[in-house]
Image: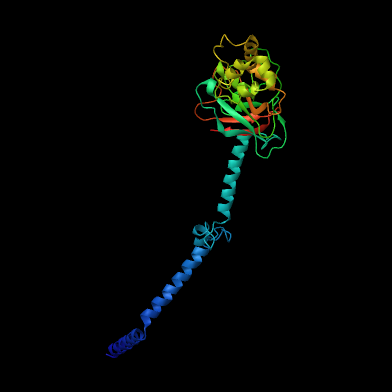
Amino acid sequence: MLRNVIAALFGFVLLAFIILWIIGGGPRKLWGAFSSSFQNATATSSEEFRLPWQPAGLFPTVNDEDLFGADLNPDGSPNEIEELQEEYDNLTKTADELATFGNPSPHFRKIRISPFAGDPQSPDAAEEYLTIESAIGNSENISLAGWSLQSAVSGRRIFLPEAASPLRAGAVNSTFPVSLAPGQSALVLSGRSPVGGSFRENRCTGFLTQFQSFYPALNAQCPSPETLLPLTAENITTYGDECIDFMQTIGTCSFPETLPESLPVVCRQFLRDTLSHNGCVDRLQTDASFNLDVWRLYLDSPEELWRNGHDVIRLLDEKGQTVDVYTY
């Protein structure tokens, strides 16, 4: 009987303690303590969890910001990695250009291949040409002796020819290495010359167009017939009135197809000797304005030299160093 009373009393006391514990927030405190302990344990294990034989720091922690915030600086600008990548890309591009350009010549920026005058893509060798010109700022005469043009794609290389100055039509001409003075240019034509060789244009070369075709067209800057036979008392006495009148009907850079039978013999001979390329040269070659600033250099190829699609053409000096590159 006493044992039952003691058991009932113990049960009552235990129930009272449970009720008081619940009223005092016991479950919430227990959950809070458990959560705090779990978070601390998780943080500790995530920061450095290792087996007993593993050294500390074997698995270093990685900050999310280090992984996902490294591409930009706090102000949103590219970081050092992006800047280094950009610099690397620029250096790679420069290296590629240098590989195409080759070893620069001392004449770099003094002579250039004109990007505006020429047609290297023509399928006809007679119309395929490039223009080499003295660059803006060049202040010296530069010899083209031993210079060449080379395709960096096909490897084809051809040397620039010498030229005559002045040219004598129908004759074997003496030729010399071309020198480009400031303001001068040279048309480098792939085909064969209509007059048998390369030459410098002058105030008389327009006469050549009467019997030969040139591409591109020659400068037709021949002197007018009136200037070749000016109206002076001496000329009137020597050649006669009819000769003077007939000269005024002749176009520039041409010889008349027929000569009137009534012209004096001396007039007819004067016309034959004067209204031609060679005759014009004989009369004007000592004039200061005789030579023009354009050379025509014929490479004498029966076929086209440069690619019709795309090509990289290098102008090389006498040592094989690159003066300029023309890409199309």
- Give x and y (percent) for residue 301: 58, 18
Q: How is the image coloured?
A: rainbow
Q: Nearer the viewer, residue 230 or 147?
A: 230
Looking at the image, which residue is at 59% across and 22% down? Answer: 206
The answer to whether residue 298 is seen in the rendering is no
- Give x and y (percent) for residue 311: 54, 30
Which image quarter: residue 275?
top right
Q: Nearer the viewer, residue 319 or 16?
A: 319
Against 129, is 104 above or below?
Answer: below
- The quadrant of the image that shows the N terminus is bottom left
Against 80, is 16 above or below?
Answer: below
Against 77, is 272 above or below?
Answer: above
Q: Is residue 57 left or right of residue 4?
A: right
Q: Nearer the viewer, residue 28 or 115?
A: 115
Which image quarter: residue 152?
top right
Against 260, is 142 above or below?
Answer: below
Looking at the image, which residue is at 68% across and 26% down? Answer: 290
Q: Is residue 270 left or right of residue 127?
A: right
Count of all numbered marks drawn on residues in the image:
0
Q: Nearer the viewer, residue 112 or 200?
A: 200
- Give x and y (percent) for residue 156: 59, 23
The answer to whether residue 28 is seen in the rendering is yes
- Give x and y (percent) for residue 43: 49, 67
Q: Residue furthest left?
A: 1
